Amino acid sequence: MRLDDPVVLDLTGVTDKAALMDRCAEALALPDWFGRNWDALADCLTDLPEPVTLVVTGWQAYARTRPREWGTAQEVFATAVEERPTSLSVLLVLGEPSEDPTKGMSQASDD
């Protein structure tokens, strides 16, 4: 699996399929013909010009509010990975996103 220069798909604030498709189009620089539907997303994911590690963050709220859509998104990602295992890896960041990125981090001591 290649982790160099991952593409981050931040789904924080996404509340519906249209917003999910917009975020995918932006993060992955999908072509103008991308139709913003599940089939078009599947086609684009299997036609990526170079290997991509996609790191999905902030997906938890979308998964809770739109579980069916999130399930379909997971199926599309999984199928694309299965079809092109050397070209695409999808990683889900676990845990809820924090409003304060430093929350939970301890400061180094000079002692």
Image: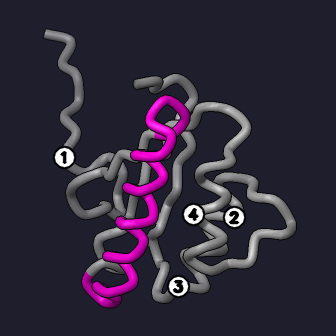
The residue lying at 23 percent from left, 30 percent from top is: 107
| Kind of residue at disc 4 | Ala
In the image, is residue 53 above or below residue 11?
above
Measured Cα–Cα span from mark 3 to mark 1: 32 Å
What is the quadrant of the C terminus in the image? top left
Instruction: Locate residue 45, reporting x and y percent.
Output: 60, 53
Q: Main secondary structure of the magenta part?
A: helix
**In what element is the residue under mark 1?**
loop
Q: Which mark is residue 17?
A: 3
The residue lying at 43 percent from left, 40 percent from top is: 89
Q: Which residue is mark 1?
A: 104
Measured Cα–Cα span from mark 1 to mark 4: 37 Å
Q: Which residues are magenta?
A: 64-88
Q: Which mark is residue 25?
A: 2
Instruction: Locate residue 106, reporting x and y percent.
Output: 19, 34
Question: Which label's residue is closer to the chain start, 2 or 4?
Answer: 2
Measured Cα–Cα span from mark 2 to mark 3: 12 Å
Instruction: Locate residue 91, reporting x and y percent.
Output: 36, 45
| Kind of residue at disc 2 | Ala
Residue 27 forms part of the magenta stretch: no
The residue lying at 47 percent from left, 78 percent from top is: 13
Question: Which label's residue is closer to the chain start, 1 or 4?
Answer: 4
Instruction: Locate residue 43, reporting x and y percent.
Output: 64, 61
Q: Are marks 2 and 4 in contact (CB under 8 Å)?
A: no
Give the residue furthest to the right.
Answer: 32
Question: Which label's residue is closer to the chain start, 3 or 4?
Answer: 3
Quadrant housing residue 70: bottom left
Q: Is residue 7 left or right of residue 89?
A: right
Q: Which mark is residue 3?
A: none
Mark 1 crowd level (few <14, some 14–19, many ≥20, 10 Å Cα)? few
Q: Which mark is residue 42?
A: 4
